[in-house]
């Protein structure tokens, strides 16, 4: 190799020294959020360190995404819809430690959301609350709880309502939610797929949706829908985690950790709020309080946390399997 060519190679590698690439494997509705977060983080990282970083995204139903990581999708970070989908990365792949949720504030949850009802403009079926979803002739769109975190939050929000209405009688709550799923004509694999089914394919009378996804549907598809805030819902907590085994292999530990910590900064909390996710930063909460209606929210703790709720409701032969077989 001549000296001139060697010099060119040296300049090339010097220019790319310190460059890193992260893969963020996330759940369905976060495409737009992370596109904006990524842009802000790349600029912030460059300003602080002088290093370039590229961030790629992968999206799908949360549980399906977790399975892809287990099957070899080289995620540096997992930003999934429920804690149980990150727990499985430890339990079945030993990709991160069991106590991963203690590594970042608020149980590694930099934003929250809730579940609302999206109806067609003018609310022609007069849907006002969960009770209306079991009425004859109401077609309900919601994704499959086996593959979608949003679907599991949907299910538990409805189930919590049924328990409250029936004096915590589980048999009556199961019967009620079985009636709801009799009104579900199709189960998409993820939340975004259900939004497309409802908004583009125009199937169904009501979409059970993440709050942020409902607002996005209105922004994306025009003034065709109304949001109905139910009297009660659930505090949805989508957590984030560094996938230790992969970042060690890639040499991206430092930038991956910084990326997730960035989500808690005022700049990122602004982006989060503007995308209709509920920020956890008190200043951002106060600034955007008018954007987030006050709804009585149950929590996953009512169901014993995800380690108890996942097998009971969504595991093999769990509550969902039982009621869905009867509903079909």
Image: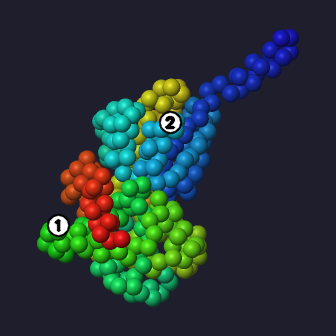
Q: Residue at x 44, y 65 (%)?
A: 187
SS for callout 1: helix
Q: Residue at x 38, y 56 (%)?
A: 146
Left or right: residue 193 compared with residue 134? right
Q: Residue at x 34, y 78 (%)?
A: 133
Q: Is residue 137 above or below residue 222?
A: below
Q: For this rendering, which residue is in front, 205 or 111?
A: 205
Task: Give x and y (percent) for residue 83.
Answer: 34, 47
Q: Is residue 219 above or below residue 23?
A: below
- Within-10-Å neighbours for mark 1: few <14, some 14–19, many 20+: few
Q: For this rendering, which residue is in front, 313 or 118?
A: 313
Q: Which residue is mark 2?
A: 72
State the quadrant of the C terminus. Answer: bottom left
Q: Which residue is mark 1?
A: 170
Q: How is the image coloured?
A: rainbow
Task: Give x and y (percent) for residue 227.
Answer: 43, 76
Q: Residue at x 35, y 59 (%)?
A: 152
- Mark on residue 56? none
State the quadrant of the N terminus. Answer: top right
Label 1 – label 2 distance at C-alpha:
39 Å
**Visible residue check, residue 26:** yes
Q: Is residue 105 above or below residue 208?
A: above
Q: Give the quarter of the image for residue 160.
A: bottom left
């Amino acid at each position: 190799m001549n000296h001139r060519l060697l010099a060119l190679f040296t300049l090339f590698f010097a220019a790319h020294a310190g460059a890193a690439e992260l893969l963020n494997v996330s759940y369905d509705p976060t495409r737009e959020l992370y596109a904006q977060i990524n842009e802000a983080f790349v600029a912030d990282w460059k300003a602080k360190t002088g290093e370039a970083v590229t961030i790629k995204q992968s999206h799908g139903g949360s549980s399906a995404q977790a399975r892809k990581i287990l099957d070899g999708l080289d995620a540096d970070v997992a930003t999934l819809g429920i804690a149980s989908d990150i727990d499985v990365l430890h339990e079945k792949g030993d990709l991160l430690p069991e106590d991963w949720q203690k590594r970042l504030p608020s149980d590694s949850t930099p934003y929250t959301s809730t579940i609302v009802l999206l109806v067609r403009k003018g609310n022609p079926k007069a849907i006002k609350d969960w009770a209306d979803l079991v009425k004859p002739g109401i077609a309900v769109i919601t994704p499959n709880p086996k593959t979608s975190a949003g679907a599991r939050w949907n299910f538990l929000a409805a189930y919590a309502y049924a328990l409250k209405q029936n004096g915590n009688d589980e048999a009556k709550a199961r019967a009620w939610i079985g009636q709801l799923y009799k009104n579900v004509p199709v189960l998409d694999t993820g939340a975004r797929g259900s939004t497309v089914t409802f908004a583009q394919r125009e199937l169904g009378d009501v979409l059970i949706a993440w709050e942020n996804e409902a607002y996005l549907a209105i922004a994306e598809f025009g003034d065709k829908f109304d949001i109905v805030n139910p009297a009660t819902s659930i505090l949805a907590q989508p957590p984030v985690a560094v996938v230790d085994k992969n970042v060690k292999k890639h040499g991206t530990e430092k930038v991956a950790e910084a990326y997730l910590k960035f989500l808690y900064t005022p700049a990122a909390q602004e982006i989060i709020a503007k995308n209709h996710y509920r920020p956890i930063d008190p200043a951002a909460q106060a600034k955007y309080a008018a954007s987030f209606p006050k709804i009585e929210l149950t929590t996953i703790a009512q169901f014993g946390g995800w380690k108890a709720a996942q097998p009971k409701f969504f595991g093999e032969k769990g509550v969902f399997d039982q009621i869905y077989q009867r509903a079909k």
